[in-house]
């Protein structure tokens, strides 16, 4: 799966994703979009107020960069541990503290049976990576978890 994110500065975002985070650029349309991949994680970065293509018209979501608001996207990935380790290594190689951009502690196993971590980009977008394959072959693994206060919303009824 891929996440679709807006960015107020496409060239700067592209340089960050490829230079610091170790993403591979699959396609770049200057002023409009970049398609990126890092292992199982694929991203579409769209410039704010990118010129519409041949069949598109500007819509309400096509905001100018001055009105950019960071977003959060959830993306299902496989081999989440390998992805996290690779992103961490790329950040270290770029001379950055990985914890400035990645969740502390790496992918966490959640009571609902998924491993999850979050990646933050330089503009504040958050990419929530989820791997559901962890307990797919061993549902009994979920029996280890106890729900704590705050894990589930209170029953409103």
Image (cartoon, helix red, strand yellow):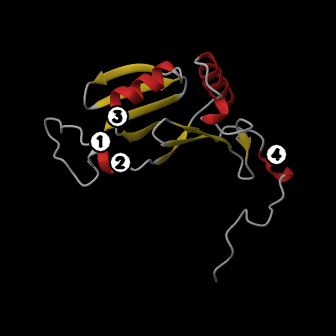
Give the distance between the C-alpha atoms of the residues marked 1 and 2, in whole angstroms. Answer: 7 Å
Q: Nearer the viewer, mark 1 or mark 4?
A: 1
In the rendered image, residue 24, in percent from the top left (x then y), is placed at 45, 19
Mark 2, secondary structure of its residue: loop
Residue 29 versus residue 99 in the image, above or below: above
The quadrant of the image that shows the C terminus is bottom right
Are the residues tagged 3 and 1 within 8 Å (C-beta)? no
Q: State the residue at coordinates (57%, 34%).
A: 77
The residue carrying mark 1 is 48
Residue extending farthest top = 93
Give the distance between the C-alpha atoms of the residues marked 4 and 2, in whole angstroms. Answer: 42 Å
Q: Residues within 10 Å of mark 4 (few under 14, many from 20)?
A: few
Give the distance between the C-alpha atoms of the residues marked 3 and 2, in whole angstroms. Answer: 10 Å
Label for residue 68? Answer: 2
Give the distance between the C-alpha atoms of the residues marked 4 and 3, in whole angstroms. Answer: 44 Å
Are the residues tagged 1 and 2 within 8 Å (C-beta)? yes
In the rendered image, residue 120, in percent from the top left (x then y), is placed at 54, 38
The residue carrying mark 4 is 141
In the rendered image, residue 151, in percent from the top left (x then y), is placed at 73, 62
| First in sequence: mark 1 vs mark 2 | 1
The residue carrying mark 3 is 9
Q: Would you say 86 lies left or right of 52 here? A: right
Q: Would you say 101 lies left or right of 37 here? A: right
């Amino acid at each position: 799966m891929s996440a679709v994110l807006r960015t107020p500065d496409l060239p700067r975002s592209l340089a960050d994703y490829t230079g610091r985070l170790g993403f591979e650029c699959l396609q770049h349309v200057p002023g409009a979009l970049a398609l990126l991949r890092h292992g199982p994680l694929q991203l579409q970065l769209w410039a704010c107020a990118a010129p519409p293509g041949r069949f598109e018209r500007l819509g309400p979501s096509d905001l100018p960069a001055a009105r950019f608001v960071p977003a959060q996207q959830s993306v299902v990935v496989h081999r989440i541990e390998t992805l996290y380790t690779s992103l961490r290594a790329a950040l270290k190689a770029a001379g950055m503290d990985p914890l400035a951009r990645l969740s502390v502690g790496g992918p966490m196993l959640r009571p609902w049976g998924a491993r999850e971590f979050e990646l933050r980009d330089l503009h504040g977008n958050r990419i929530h990576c989820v791997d559901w394959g962890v307990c797919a072959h061993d549902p009994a693994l979920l029996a280890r978890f106890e729900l704590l206060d705050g894990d589930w919303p209170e029953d409103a009824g």
